Image (cartoon, rainbow, N blue to C red):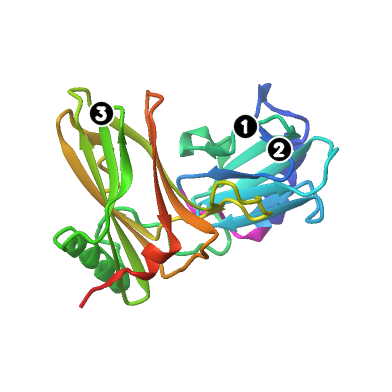
Amino acid sequence: MNYVFTTVTLFFLSGELLGQEYPVIKLPAGKTVTLMFEDRIGNAGTTLLSYSEQSVQRRANANRFSMQVLKRNLSEGSLYLELESGHFYQFLLQPDDDATQLFYRFSLTDALGVNPFGTATPQQPLKTEPDAGLSDDQTDIQQVARACLKENDNCGLGEEKESLQFTCTGIYYKDDHLYFKLNFYNRSHLPFEIKLIDVNKVNKQGLRRNTSDPIPVPPLFVLNQSISTVDGKGSHQKVLVFDKFTISSKRLLRIELLEDNGDRTHQINIPGKQIILAQKLK
């Protein structure tokens, strides 16, 4: 297993694989850049970052890998990642304080190849849709998430702009899990295609940024994840499920909606006090 990783890394450090350049990730100093994938990232032995931990802080969480430059004037570096599915990626890292893109999303088809052995210590895969492979605990989460759709609304945070209303209408709590009910209402005749729903803990505006801002908060489960279109003059609901957490009064939970094949973005900013008031389900 280690021989495979070493051989792949030597090829990639040349900057090309069979004449094809690999993606460039630009790292602005003091800001967190996050890479998201379609499967969980493998164990530590399959993640190789050329920078030391004193130069670049890194964090792997489920299907996300975050980096933050702690020192300026770094030279170019490289990152190798392998997913539990065996799909592997190589990136060229370029420090750039003028960079504005802080989030990158990669599909399985973007991988440079697939290791047929997969990772040595696979974890429980992410569950975004109900299927026959759900464990008893995951089945319970799915059932509670469906029940949330019938619960009375207890908040109305969000925004309406550019003919789309995007709101969080309910926050619920049961068995150490938080459930966030999201509503989508499309006032346009044109369908709204959902590209991404991204969730992070962020500092409130006007407060000084710190080294951990933003902090990605990937959901454990998403009800109706496979539905990615809000039809014209139509509506849709999703429920995001997380392990129980709280946030301080200086931070917000930000749920951001990005449009596919379009430029519209929408945000829901949820203060910590609203999370603490989550309705307990029986």
| Marks 2 and 3, the one that precedes in the sequence | 2
Residue at point 59%, 50% (across, down): 65
State how far apart marks 3 and 1 are (Cα). 27 Å
Cβ–Cβ under 8 Å for marks 2 and 1: yes
Query: Residue 163 got which mark?
Result: 3
**Amino acid carrying mark 2 in the image:** Pro
In this picture, is 158 found above or below 126?
above
Tell me the SS state at disc 2.
loop
Q: Which amino acid type corresponds to the residue marked 3 in the rendered image?
A: Ser
Disc nearer the start of the sequence (3/1) = 1
Label at residue 71? none
Which one is closest to the eye, mark 2 or mark 3? 3
5 vs 209, nearest the viewer:
209
Question: Mark 2 = which residue?
Answer: 28
| Residue 34 screen position, x and y as percent | 58, 45
Which quadrant does the N terminus fall into? bottom right
Residue carrying label 1: 100
Magenta-colored stretch includes residue 176: no
Q: How far apart are marks 2 and 3 (CA)?
A: 34 Å
Tell me residue 20's x, y (percent): 65, 23
**How many marks on residues?**
3
- Residue 210 visible? The answer is yes
**221 relative to 235, above or below:** below
Check disc 1 and report its element: helix, strand or loop.
Answer: loop
Query: The disc labelled 1 sits on which kind of residue?
Result: Thr
Q: Give the range drawn in magenta.
A: 39-44
